[in-house]
Image (cartoon, rainbow, N blue to C red):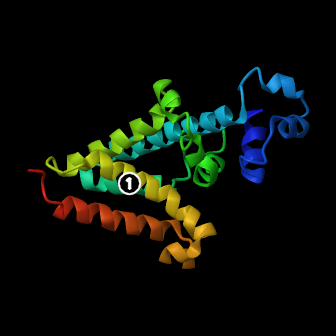
Amino acid sequence: MLSGGLALMNELGLEAFTFKKLAERIGCTEVSLYKYFPNKHRLLQFYFQLYWLWLRQLCGRHAEMAKDPRVGLEHVVEAICGIWPKELPDVQLDPHALRRLVIEEGMKSYLHKHVDEDNAKRLFLPYKELSAFVAERLTDCRADLPWPRSFATTVIEMAHSLPFAMEHLPSLTELSSRKDLKQLARHLLHRTFTYIDHAQPLK
């Protein structure tokens, strides 16, 4: 059900996706799907949570292996940009498909009128924990870095919003000409280390 739902949601997009279509695709009844998720939005949020939990695990592995905090941060930013080693942490669904869904549809999991209610239910905790983890890696490189959590969130957002622009709104970024994740990582790493080295401390 989960793998079929992920594939179909990537194929159709959230708006066109329905539990009726999923039931037809995987050969079950529509009613049975509602036993697991009350609506398709909750299913999207499940994929959203699973992706950030898995990415946090991958980033943690990179940080632990690096002896130098700047090298560790470099590997973390690359992982956030989708540059992954062949051997990946176990996850019940294809992480590449999860990343694609987060890039294409992920913002819809929280850009809605009931976001505060969902936040109170801690539905965005995995995303927040990844942001906190990246912020810690930033302050490992420079203890007095201003606004580390804000910058960490900016890096994570850009690593997922720029690939969307590269694919669908190419005039928004020069990265569209090659659609290269390594080029995206170089861009964000340049911004990151420039910020670390030159940002003025808070007064």
- Image quadrant in which the N terminus is located: top right
Q: Position of residue 102 (x, y in %)?
A: 59, 48
Q: Residue furthest top?
A: 35
Please say if 86 is above or below 44. below
The local crowd at label 1, few if under 14, some if 14 to 19, many if 20 or more residues have their Cα within 10 Å, is few
Q: Which residue is mark 1?
A: 154
* Residue 83 seen in this snapshot: no
Q: Secondary structure at mark 1?
A: helix
Q: Is residue 193 above or below residue 92?
A: below
Residue plotted at (56% across, 52% down): 86
Q: Residue at x 39, y 47 (%)?
A: 62
Instruction: Please tell me which residue lies in front, 112 or 136.
Output: 112
Type of amino acid under label 1: Thr
Q: Nearer the viewer, residue 8 or 67?
A: 8
Q: Is residue 60 left or right of residue 136?
A: right
Left or right: residue 73 versus residue 126 is left
Q: Residue at x 86, y 36 (%)?
A: 20
Position of residue 185 measured from the top left corner of the image (x, y, whole percent): 43, 64
Residue 42, can we see it? yes
- How far across and down, in percent of the image, does residue 101 sit? 64, 49
| Residue toward you, 76 or 36 | 36
Residue 94: name its quadrant: top right
- In which quarter of the view is residue 188 placed? bottom left
Q: Position of residue 65 (x, y in %)?
A: 35, 45
